[in-house]
Image (tube, rainbow, N blue to C red):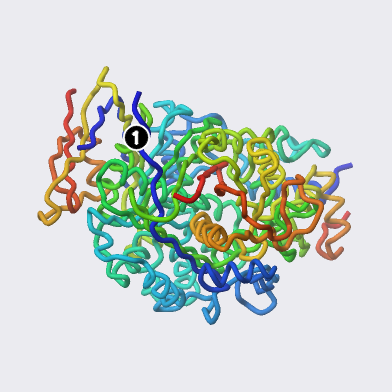
Amino acid sequence: MLERWITALRTEDAGDESPAATRERLRDLFPRNATRRMTQLGIVLGSTLQPLRPRENDTVVYASTHAETLALEGYLDSFPNPSPTLFQTSIHPSSVQQNLIQLQQPVRELLPLTGGDDLPALALQAALLAPTARTLLCGGEERGGWLLEQGHASDRTFAFTLVLSTDATDAIGRVSLEPAASDAPFRPLPLAAFFDHLHHRRPCDLLVSPGRRLVLNWST
Amino acid sequence: MSDPLKNQLKTLMIDTLRLEDVTPADIVDDEPLIGGGLSLDSIDALELVVRLEKEFGIKIGSSEESRTALASVNALADYIRAHADSSRLPAA
Amino acid sequence: MSVPPPPIRVAACGALTAFGDETVTLDALLAGRTALAARPVQGRPGDDLVPLALIPARPYDETLPPGWLPALQTLAARIPGEGWGTPRRPVFVTGSNFGVGHLLAFRRHGDPAHLDLGTPYECVAHVARTLGWGPDVTVISHACVSAHLGLLQATRTLHAGLADEALVFSFDFISAFVAGGFHALKILNADFPAPYQNRPVGSIGLGDGAAFAVLTRDRGDFALAGQSLHNEMHHFTANRADGSGFAACLADLPAAAVRRVWLKGHGTGTLEAGRLETAALDQAFPDAPLVSWKGALGHTLGSCGLVELAIALAAIRRGRAPGTIGATAPGFTPAVAFDAFDLAGFDGVVCTSNAFGGAHAAFIACHA
């Protein structure tokens, strides 16, 4: 069994808020002019990640299915004169880098994952296997534009950062991945649903992928 | 007397890079564009290059060339005057 | 004090480049050949020409089904064993671009079928179905260090006893989406890359690449004797000027694991990063000869770490390492090896990759 204590959690649910509204609402969390090139996902992620002060010897695991959707759309729309800013910004794991570069905060390990409905389980496994005493598991999505109209983007903007520790001091919860029979029926937990469990501090005990049972409990 | 090309470049910079609370009068002609008071970086410079290439029909071939051309507003104006078709420049 | 686990073993490793498999690629590199050719950056007449190395007969524009899929199937047919994508035999897919060229194809031509391959996970899901893998597929995407991260995650999964064997599978095929972006960054330009050469202008080339590695705890001729990472988070496209990011990653490698190493660096052909990289490698491994093959293969982006590992292992088997094709003296340091050299007396190779955001990754590969 892989397990860690949850010692901190921040979530941000921007729903279907426009990027401009998110930028206006959260701009005071960032230095002046810092949000100029940030994406909506970068801003909401930063609102959860930066207060938890990543440190150099932490592991950061990042999970997003669609990542920088609007930068991607903008970059595609900029052809035949492609925008270097939007190209750069669209590359995974941009939203984490937007924040850590702003902080000038090196980290030893950054593990950016992407995936479908199995993403939270696999990202959690990566986080629980990290050798560092403290691991930040973060992720989120931003609401798409024309990619959403085509059914290939998130319909909501949200972000989360969980601090996972080997030390139970001040723990607010506990998360584990427990082995299960690999042929037992499972029900994937997509990223948005995982976010809702975190955001509302709902417990979870689900077979989320072959051989993996995700157990999430809250003490406060 | 103000230089119309430099004024045009400053307006273009503010527009392209979405510089908030910055007016053309705030941009100093001989101050470094990258790493100077505007806090622009190399990616901003490259974004500006795309716009400049489209606006003036110039072609900047490498990152080294863009760094030289965009050293300051003065350097950029000199570069454009040297490389752009004069029909694309604002009237003096 | 806990005893570290023994080095993970590489039971199988293969690659595909514009030349062919890793053996054919090694032959070409030892002969000093380059696969790079000047091609229109967005695939249209009149475009700027840039150096690209594409696998033969693949259309540059994305097609349905993808033009690169048969090549991937040919590579995957060499992967030993069955049951990949099950809990005890998980797959770690790594890359940077996956099917992103299909998004541009959709924008250009309007066929929504392209969108089913556009996001990384949908592209990988399509590949997994095509190759007959099960659902246990982790997708790791961190630009040019992606393959290193896949190797590291596979290693941890094996050490934790969660799997019996692990497959790391990496691919990155060039599209106008990607070439257009690097061209806009002004580092993919008319000049061909000359990694580690001390010259006034830097430039890169881009190349198709795919590779696989089967990792086990106890089987295989080669081992990964140490793996390390570091992320500077200083700037998206620039490194800290003092080279400390490169040094920090190298410092975490177990230098005592092997006595005498050669170095397979990242070496894309850019100037500042090349200077910092060579200086850091020279400091950490004095007198170790350094090569980069991106001057011949192009930068294979998200697959480069694994593609170049496969070639390095083939070189060790052959007993001869290709030099830094495309570059000539002077190099940034005397350690840069422009010509091929014999590997007698070397115990292993340090392989490094770097990526946007100042990401650094390294491992030591040696005989088990």
A209 w.r.t. A177: above or below: below
- Dividing the picture into quadrants, the one containing residue C249 is top right
SS at circle 1: strand
In this rendering, does residue A127 appear at all? yes
A113 w.r.t. C5: above or below: below
Q: Amino acid at mark 1?
A: Thr
Where residue B46 appears, as percent x and y from the top left, is: 68, 52
Judged left or right of residue C142, residue A187 is left
- Dividing the picture into quadrants, the one containing residue C236 is top right
Judged left or right of residue C310, residue C12 is left
User: Which residue position is annotated with label 1?
Assistant: A161
Judged left or right of residue C122, residue C206 is right
Where residue C356 appears, as percent x and y from the top left, is: 56, 47
Judged left or right of residue A192, residue C112 is right
C318 or C2: which is nearer to us? C318
Where residue A101 appears, as percent x and y from the top left, is: 54, 36
- View extreme (bottom): residue: C57
Q: For label 1, count other residues whose C-alpha is less than 10 Å away and answer few (under 14), some (14-19) or many (20+).
A: many
C59 w.r.t. C195: above or below: below
Instruction: Name the quadrant of the N terminus of chain A.
Output: top left
Question: Number of callouts in the render?
Answer: 1
Where residue C310 appears, as percent x and y from the top left, is: 50, 60
x 68%, y 49%: residue? C289
Q: Chain of mark 1?
A: A
